[in-house]
Amino acid sequence: MIRDLETDFESNSAPADVCIVGAGAAGIVLAIELAKSGKRVLLLESGGRGEEPATRDLYTSELAGLRHTGIHEGRHRVYGGSTTRWGGQVLELFEDDFARRPWIEGSGWPIAKQELTSYYSRALDLQGLHDVTRDDREAWREVGLDLPEFGPKLTPFFSRWCREPNFTRLHGAALTTAENIEVVLHANAVEILLADDGGTVRGLRCRTLSGREAVFTARQYVFCLGGIETARFLLQAHAEGQAPWHRNEWLGRHFQDHLDVYCADLVDVQTERFHAYFDHVCRRGYRYEPRFRLTSDEQEKAGLLNVAGMVFFEDRPDSPRDGVWQTMKHLIRGRLREVSARDVGTLAKHLPLLARQMYRYQVQGRSFNPEGLVKFRLRVFCEQEPLGESRITLGTQKDALGHFRARLDWRISERELASVRRFVEVVRDSFAERQLARVVPDPDLMDNPDVFRGKVMDSYHHMGGARMAASATQGVVDLDLKIHGTRNAYVCSSAVFPASGFSNPTHTLLALAVRLADHLKDS
């Protein structure tokens, strides 16, 4: 059932078993998994069914450090959260990311990757990837190729992409029809109400932008807010005094994103082999993106962070390719409302282009080769230091709900730049040895680090600020994601990541959500 606090809802008459705050990827998956076990679930969402300027303004934030585009463009306060806008890329964290690396302070997770193995598998199912090919070698064999070989310092791998990235579409029927899931829209959480013991949440006060209020109650509370919003919300003062998490010095500290930067041009390319290695693999409706990472041995030898890259095919600016293919996907999936008359006209005009793309996609199992290609570029993704200096605090201005806005101080360390620099050098040597291409690094990467920092983009991957740890002296939440010092309040967001690797965080977050659902089923 889906209701709206603004128009047809006041308060829940009986406490739910679990109240989930935030109907993004983690909140939706957690609600569905809990409902399967018979739990009565209340799922609260700040936004409505579509983007609303007034609601979006609640995410307006202050910047104190480097440019960070994702603090505004990468956050979506709407039913479905960021799944309404993300591409749907799925990639596990690597063993290195969970392990303690002696050369990196604060590295590792308090749980081993094996703890998440079964949950990663269940998360694939919940992302609509039931029968995706899970082994990289087998995915290459499906298109008649062997796994590429780049030498002892680089390891190839695939990321995978969801067929349907929007979780309100993927799980819409379950959210709408399940008798034990109640979704409430426009329910902005404004205050956590604590019992007299100071560690038990007894209720959650919510308010619409027009001023309607309701208090929601449950046995357990889970905050599935975004990576930035988690710290911002918990840092707010509460009317009933200091909450346990306000005494935790880790809250808001060590924010992490992924460095995303074009580091080199690739020239003198051996075109046929290049496309064989780096075009996307497309089989049975699934898409696999080839990437390559610095090996664990090379990271340890040079004292570096986890870093990876891909070949980016830069098409000419006026190319219709992406627009034509996007229109076709909307038509195939029946999303007629997302297709304009102009889109249909462009599609008709470029039918030969579409036919070639469909042939290569359906028959050859590869993505389309751009026509009029401008250049090949090396795009690099790098983790940030787990105990880096980036931080989320509260700003000086308040939003329409009376909460202080987020203030982000985003920084890039020398070790992070050194990791990118060494990766480019390794790729340069590997490609030269195999006569794949000549790698021409950005000169600022090598000689002008301060200038190069200005070229680095964030990835809209907001992690850290409420790290998982065994005790409150080491982090904000425990190994079951319960907030230290509380009895029934949990955080399930990428803010709990102690270390971030370079992998897209959503898949790991969903594995944590499924794991938390199993924990709450028995509590």
Image: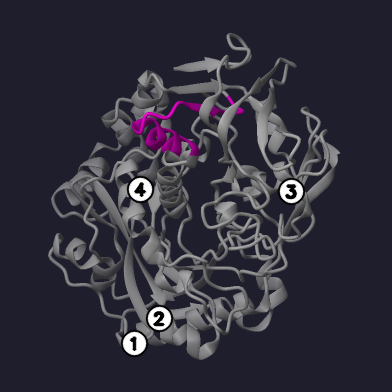
- What is the total number of numbered labels drawn onto the structure image? 4
Q: Residue furthest right?
A: 396
Location of residue 137 by image quarter: bottom left
In the visual, does 134 lie left or right of 344? left
Q: Colour scheme in the image? A: one colour
> What residue lies at 72% left-to-right and 74% top-to-bottom?
450
Taking the view exactly as shown, the residue that stands out farthest to the front is 197
Tell me how far mark 4 sits from mark 2, CA to CA: 26 Å
The label nearer to you, 4 versus 1, is 4
Report if the CB atoms under discs 4 and 1 are less than 8 Å apart: no
The residue lying at 52 percent from left, 66 percent from top is 110
User: Where residue 270 sits: x, y (%)?
Assistant: 29, 75
The residue that label 4 is drawn on is 123
Q: Is residue 281 one of those drawn in magenta?
A: no
Q: Which mark is residue 244?
A: 3
Task: Give the mark nearer the N terminus: 2 vs 3.
Answer: 3
Q: CA distance from mark 3 to mark 1?
A: 49 Å
Whichever of callouts 4 and 2 sits on the residue coming sooner in the sequence is 4
Q: Are marks 2 and 1 in contact (CB under 8 Å)?
A: yes
Numbered disc 3: secondary structure: helix
Q: Amino acid at mark 4?
A: Ala
Q: CA distance from mark 4 to mark 1?
A: 32 Å
Quickly name the residue at label 1.
152
